[in-house]
Each structure stands twice: as structure tokens, then as C-alpha cells.
Image: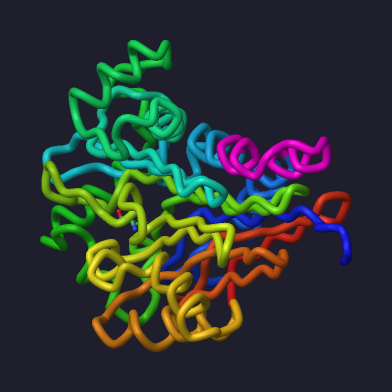
């Protein structure tokens, strides 16, 4: 048997990202950010680290980067606040942890990881999740920490256009830079053959207070199982929840024997569009195959094998 070649893939959200909407300088900044994120996860895998640590590090870096809609740079709710969701899953044990509707945690993905390690629950929300994270010694931040000019302007435009939850904008053509989503995620396979997935988001612009999307829901926006695949999603969360998108990729592989590419094609290009689900996902299977499908104009994405070149892309 060939030795397993560890691999990591990341995303920074999908949407109507076009060449017209991004200038060369902005484009370069996204490539640079994605490369830095991949590099962090890749370094862990190259040292023989776990897939779980690699996806945690990658998503941590994405949360710290204001370009993406997670941690700093999170989108605004209808009330002008920020509510963040994150999840993580270990494909070896099917252990999982998630937090939703948190407003004061600097890195929701670290809180999700602690919930998983604690083992008692899978999903903690709101104040309870924040208290748990504080007790675990995780960093808290004031509400204005998440603020960025770009997200604020985006929210103002959504308010003036009455585009509640930004989902209507998603269907709009031609291209609208505001409908680009920036949820982040990572999936990895390590040298021991273990898979892991992690997802983190600020949700959708102008969402109702208390709204929870697919990102913190195991099986919807995040799933990992060593028997099949690790998946992290981005897109119109309500449809990803209804389609159990991440788990569906795994189920199609496990029960129908589809390859990774076939299962991804079925979910992203056929099943999600059938209910108007727009977005994409990143997936790596137990053999180290990578698939990064999306049904939007673009998706910030990248992947790298241990010891290999890092590749990043935005458009189709
Ligand atoms: N899926 C996320 C949500 O619905 C949004 C995104 O991917 O940008 O919360």
C-alpha cells in the first residue's frame, strides 16, 4: 500500500465573485491570505501533526483575517451586531463540537474545539457557549472588535435595499459583489489516515438576530468520517441545512458507492440547485482526493499536499 500523503484544503466563502468585482490588488490580497492559511495547516501536517490540528490552525488564521466573514470581519445582523457560528469534527471518532450565536469570542473555532474535547455536548449556543469558552481560558473581545468598514458598508446597502438575510441578493444576476459570502472552512487528511473538518462564519449579512445557519450544524455545514470524507460548506445556509449537504456527500459515497467527485457533483450541482441552494464546499476523502465544487461565480479556495506546492484560486 502507498503511504498516505497528507493534504489540506481551505475555503473563504463562495458567491458571485467576478473579475469585475475585484481589482488586481484585492485579488492579490486574497491569494496571499489563502496561501498563508494553507501554509499554517500544511506545516502541521508535514510535521506529522493531526488533521484536527491542521484544520483548527487554518480556520483560526481565517478568523483572524479581516477579509473573510468569520471572527474579525464578520458580517452584521439586522440589528447591527455580530453573531458567530463555528464547528469542528474528527473523522476518526466522529467526535464533534460547535458553538452558535456567540458575540464575544475572538475565535469561535477554538470554542468549538473545546466543546468537542469536553465531550459532554456537541453544540452550545449564546451566553452558555461564551461562559464555557471563558472558563476554558479562551480570548473574549468587545463587540466592535469584529467591525470592518467593508462589512458595515455591505450591511448599509442591504438595509437600504431591504435585502433581508442577503439570500435574495444571491439569486440576483448579474454579479453583485455584496452577495459574495465569506464563511471559512478547512478539511484535511493526516499521515495516520485521519480526516477532520472545520467551519466558521459570521452568517449572512442583515440576518435576523438569533438566526443560525448551516456552519455550526454537524452534517449540514461540516462533517468528517474516516470511512468516507471530510466536508466544509459555504453558501445559502438554509438550503444547506435542508439538504444536510455535508453529510449527504458522505452518505452518497458510503451507501451508493459514488466517488468523491461524483458525490460532490450530485450535491452541489444537482441537489442544492433544486431548492435554490447556492454555494460550494471543500472535501477531501480517505484516499487524499480533493474536490472543491461550487455553483456560484467563484469561491475563495486552496489546497496543498504535505511537501507540495500550495494552490489558491478564486474564480471558476
Ligand atoms: N453558510 C453560511 C451561513 O448561512 C454563509 C456563508 O457560507 O457565507 O451562515
Q: Which quadrant of the render holds ligand 1? A: bottom left
Using the image as rendered, state which of residue 266 and residue 119 is in the foreground: 119
Q: Quadrant of residue 121?
A: top left
Q: Say which residue appears at 35% left-offset and 24% top-offset.
A: 105
Using the image as rendered, state which of residue 119 and residue 130 is in the foreground: 119
Q: Say which residue appears at 12% left-offset and 42% top-offset.
A: 209
Q: Quadrant of residue 118?
A: top left
Q: Say which residue appears at 16% left-offset and 48% top-offset.
A: 211
| Residue 128: image location, x then y, percent | 20, 24
Q: Is residue 195 above or below residue 257?
A: above
Span shown in magenta: 40-57
Q: Say which residue appears at 42% left-offset and 80% top-offset.
A: 267
Q: Quadrant of the N terminus?
A: bottom right
Q: Quadrant of residue 177?
A: bottom left
| Residue 150: image location, x then y, percent | 38, 44
Q: Main secondary structure of the magenta part?
A: helix
Would you say 106 lies left or right of 76 here?
Answer: right
- Examine the structure image and report whether residue 100 is included in the region drawn in magenta: no
Would you say 16 lies left or right of 127 here?
Answer: right
Amino acid at each position: 500500500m502507498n503511504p498516505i500523503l497528507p493534504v489540506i484544503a481551505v475555503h473563504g466563502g463562495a458567491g458571485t465573485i467576478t473579475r469585475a468585482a475585484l481589482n488586481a490588488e484585492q485579488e492579490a490580497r486574497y491569494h496571499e491570505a489563502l496561501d498563508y492559511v494553507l501554509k499554517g495547516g500544511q506545516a502541521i501536517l508535514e510535521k506529522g501533526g493531526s488533521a484536527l490540528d491542521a484544520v483548527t490552525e487554518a480556520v483560526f488564521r481565517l478568523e483572524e483575517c479581516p477579509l473573510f466573514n468569520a471572527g474579525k470581519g464578520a458580517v452584521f445582523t439586522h440589528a447591527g451586531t455580530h453573531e458567530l457560528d463555528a464547528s469542528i469534527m474528527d473523522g476518526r471518532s466522529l467526535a464533534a463540537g460547535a458553538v452558535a450565536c456567540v458575540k464575544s469570542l475572538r475565535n469561535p473555532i477554538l470554542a468549538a474545539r473545546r466543546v468537542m474535547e469536553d465531550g459532554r455536548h456537541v453544540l452550545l449556543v449564546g451566553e452558555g457557549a461564551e461562559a464555557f469558552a471563558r472558563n476554558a481560558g479562551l480570548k473574549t473581545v468587545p463587540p466592535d472588535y469584529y467591525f470592518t468598514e467593508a462589512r458595515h458598508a455591505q450591511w448599509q446597502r442591504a438595509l437600504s435595499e431591504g435585502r433581508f438575510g442577503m439570500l435574495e441578493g444571491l439569486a440576483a444576476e448579474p454579479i453583485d459583489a455584496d452577495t459574495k459570502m465569506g464563511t471559512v472552512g478547512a478539511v484535511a487528511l493526516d499521515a495516520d489516515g485521519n480526516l477532520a473538518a472545520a467551519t466558521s462564519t459570521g452568517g449572512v449579512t442583515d440576518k435576523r438576530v438569533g438566526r443560525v445557519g448551516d456552519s455550526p450544524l454537524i452534517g449540514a455545514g461540516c462533517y468528517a468520517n474516516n470511512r468516507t470524507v471530510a466536508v466544509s460548506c459555504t453558501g445559502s445556509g438554509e438550503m444547506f441545512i435542508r439538504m444536510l449537504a455535508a453529510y449527504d456527500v458522505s452518505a452518497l459515497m458510503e451507501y451508493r458507492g459514488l466517488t468523491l467527485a461524483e458525490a460532490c457533483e450530485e450535491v452541489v450541482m444537482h441537489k442544492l440547485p433544486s431548492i435554490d441552494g447556492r454555494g460550494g464546499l471543500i472535501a477531501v476523502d480517505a484516499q487524499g482526493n480533493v474536490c472543491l465544487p461550487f455553483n456560484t461565480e467563484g469561491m475563495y479556495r486552496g489546497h496543498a499536499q504535505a511537501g507540495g506546492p500550495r494552490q489558491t484560486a478564486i474564480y471558476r
